[in-house]
Structures are given as structure tokens and as C-alpha cells.
Amino acid sequence: MTRLLLRYRRILVLSTALLLAFVLMTLQARSGGSVALTAKQILLTSISPFLRMMTKSVDVTTMVWNEYVDLRRVRRDNQLLREEVRQLRVELGELRETALEHARLSRLLQLDERVETKAVVARVIGKDTTNWFRSILINIGTNRGIRRHMAVVTNEGLVGRVVEVTALSSRVQLITDPESAVGVLIQRSRAIGVAAGSQDGAIRVEYLPLMADVAVGDRIITSGMGGIFPKGIPVGQVVRSSRPTNATLFQLIEAQPYTDFSSLEEVMVLTRPPASGLPWAREEPSP
């Protein structure tokens, strides 16, 4: 019984207060005397703490509810802001990538105007990772007039030549392939040799006469001999030159390619050789 009273004590107190109020109003209506006034004062004195507590409870409940509603609204707004930030970051990344691609294509198009020949821009869609990037796959083929043995370049210099062609793609052999051979000359001294790839990604220049004038830093360009690569395309820069002391008739020359094959994304295929040497041949070596 005691537990039941404790459990419903608030309801009992409120019910008692309401009952007393009803009784008070009845007495006041009937007698209007001092008894009713005294009972009224006693009732007001007894229920005032309870009413103040109820008022305070209602205020606290209202405040907590408003804070809860505000908190849910803040969480929702926070989620929306986070999603908006994520989308803006994605768009910013896409814009940066578009800007970089536009810059690369602009350099290729400027090169197309300089070489005064017919050329087609292609995107690199695959690399031969099993052979140290000795070949790449581009996204154009016979549908764009591509044929075997066409030269492939970038604004930096020579990339290689087309070795396989399908309707929609082509494979390009890089100049770093040990099986590749490119007729080259030292731009400063005009000494002629043949450039071939190596396992470490550098270029070896072979068949340079032992007494040819070659120095570290010399610029190497295509010689135009062989009928595949037009004359004047930058190939690389001499990084090591030595003259063997044995009976060898040729120098040992190693060069670093101008083209960065690890970051190759777009290239240009020369579909029609120029009538004369390319304008690259008239450029001075970079300091």
C-alpha cells in the first residue's frame, strides 16, 4: 500500500488540491463568511509550493525540448554542410584535373601548329607494366588514319613509334625499349649515331665514332635517317660519355630521355611527315 501511495503521490496531491478548491468554492458560494476565507488561505498556502514546482517543471521541460529540437536541427545542418563540402572537394578535384589536362592538350596543340604537319592527339589508355613501360596503348587506330611505323611525340620530345594497330587502338613502342632503334645526331657537333633503350630506362647511343665530339649535356635529336622519325625531334640529353681504352671503335654514350614516360597521359601521332626538318632542331638546349 505504501509503495502504491508513493508511486501515485503526485496524482493524489493534485487530486486533493482540486478537491479542496472545489470545496472552497462551494463554501464561498453558500456562506461567503470567514470560514471560507480561512479555508481559501490555507489551501493557497498548501498548494503554492506544488504550483511553483509544477511551473518550474514545465519551464525546464520546455527548455530541454527546445534544446533537443535545436540539437537535431544543428546535426541535420551539420550533415548537410559535410555533404556539401564533400561535393565541393570532388568538384574542385575535377576542376584541377580538367585544368591540368587542358594545359597538356594546349601544349600539344601548340606543338601541332609548330611542326607544320598533320598530327592526331591521342590519350594513353594502357601501359606495358611487365616490361618497364616499354610500350603504351593509345585510344586511336585505323579509325583515325593511324598506321604502323608512325612517329609518336609529346611537347617534350620523342616517345616512340606505332608497332601495332587495330580499329580503335594502337600500341606504341617506346624509345626506351632495348629493341628500339632511332637514328640520332648530337645537335652541337652533328655526330651521327643510333639510340636504343636499356633495362634501366636510359638511352644508349651506339655507333658514335671514337673521336666524335660529344660532351655531357649535349642535346640529342633525331637525324631523319631510316624514314620513320622526322629530323629534329628532341630525344634526350647526354649524361655520360666515355672512350674505351680497348680496341672498341665507338664511344659509350648514355642519355636521359626528355620525355617523362612515367607520367605520360596524352601523345601526338605524326600521321604525315613534314616536308623539312622539325622546328625543334632550331631550339637551343635548355640550361
Image: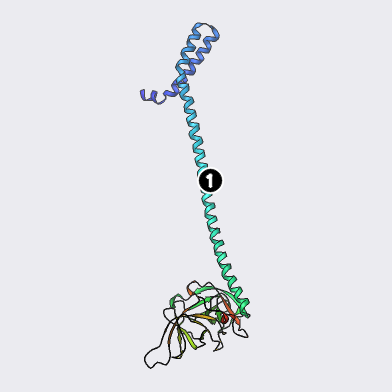
Quarter-of-image position of residue 144: bottom right
Q: Is residue 1 visible?
A: no
| Residue pointed to by mark 1 | 77
Percent coordinates x, y for residue 191 in the rendering: 50, 88
Coloring applied to the structure? rainbow
Relative horizontal placement of residue 252, taking residue 219 as reference (left or right):
left
How many neighbours does mark 1 have within 10 angstroms: few (below 14), some (14-19), or many (20 or more)?
Answer: few
Percent coordinates x, y for residue 163 in the rendering: 53, 83
Q: Amino acid at mark 1?
A: Asp
Q: In terms of depth relative to the viewer, which is nearer, 184 or 272? A: 184
Screen quadrant of the N terminus: top left
In the image, what residue occupies the spot 51% across and 15% down? Answer: 22
In the image, what residue occupies the spot 43% across and 76% down? Answer: 130
Relative horizontal placement of residue 216, taking residue 233 as reference (left or right):
left
In the image, what residue occupies the spot 46% across and 15% down? Answer: 45
Percent coordinates x, y for residue 77 in the rendering: 53, 45
Vertical side of 249 occupied by 169: above or below: above
Q: In terms of depth relative to the viewer, which is nearer, 241 or 23? A: 241
Element assignment for label 1: helix
Q: In terms of depth relative to the viewer, which is nearer, 267 or 241? A: 241
Percent coordinates x, y for residue 224 in the rendering: 56, 87
Q: Is residue 43 visible?
A: yes
Q: In terms of depth relative to the viewer, which is nearer, 241 or 2? A: 241
Label count reads 1
In the image, what residue occupies the spot 39% across and 23% down? Answer: 5
